[in-house]
Amino acid sequence: MSKFTDYIDGFADKTSTLATGELKELIISAKNDKSEFVRLQAVNVEHWTVMLAAGELTPKGFKRLVSKMEVLTELETIKLDIAAKASAQRLADGIQKHVIDGICKLL
């Protein structure tokens, strides 16, 4: 298992705020997307999560990076073609649901 997966699986989520399976699937799907932008953002989320798990990034720093990435993703969707927009929007929605509303609330 990857450090990302291990960290996500380690959350004791008694409130069901974080759907770990959906988050892992979102990242896997985004890393295999046709859009270079979407792939890069998935790699970033995974990398930042590993840094958070290793104590190399504070929860506040993690939240700040993810929030900035969410804004960047929304701006990027304006420039992309229809298919890429759909992928970028799925990523943005998933980041909001699983990372900002999930992980960040548990930190």
Image (cartoon, rainbow, N blue to C red):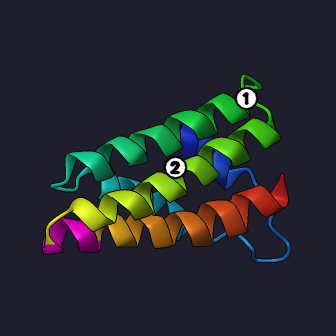
**Disc 2 designates what residue?**
69
**Magenta residues: mostly which secondary structure?**
helix
Looking at the rendering, the stretch of residues picked out in magenta corresponds to 82-86
Residue pictured at 60% horizontal, 33% vertical: 50
Q: Is residue 82 above or below residue 106?
A: below
- Answer yes or no: is residue 1 visible: no
Secondary element type, mark 1: loop
| Image-based side of 40 in relation to 83, left or right | right
Q: Amino acid at mark 2?
A: Met
Q: Is residue 59 above or below residue 74?
A: above
| Image-based side of 43 in relation to 57, left or right | left
**In this view of the protein, which residue sits in the foreground, 23 or 105?**
105
> Which one is closest to the eye, mark 1 or mark 2?
2
Secondary element type, mark 2: helix
Q: Amino acid at mark 1?
A: Leu
- Answer yes or no: is residue 98 visible: yes
Q: Is residue 57 magenta?
A: no
- Residue 57 - label: 1
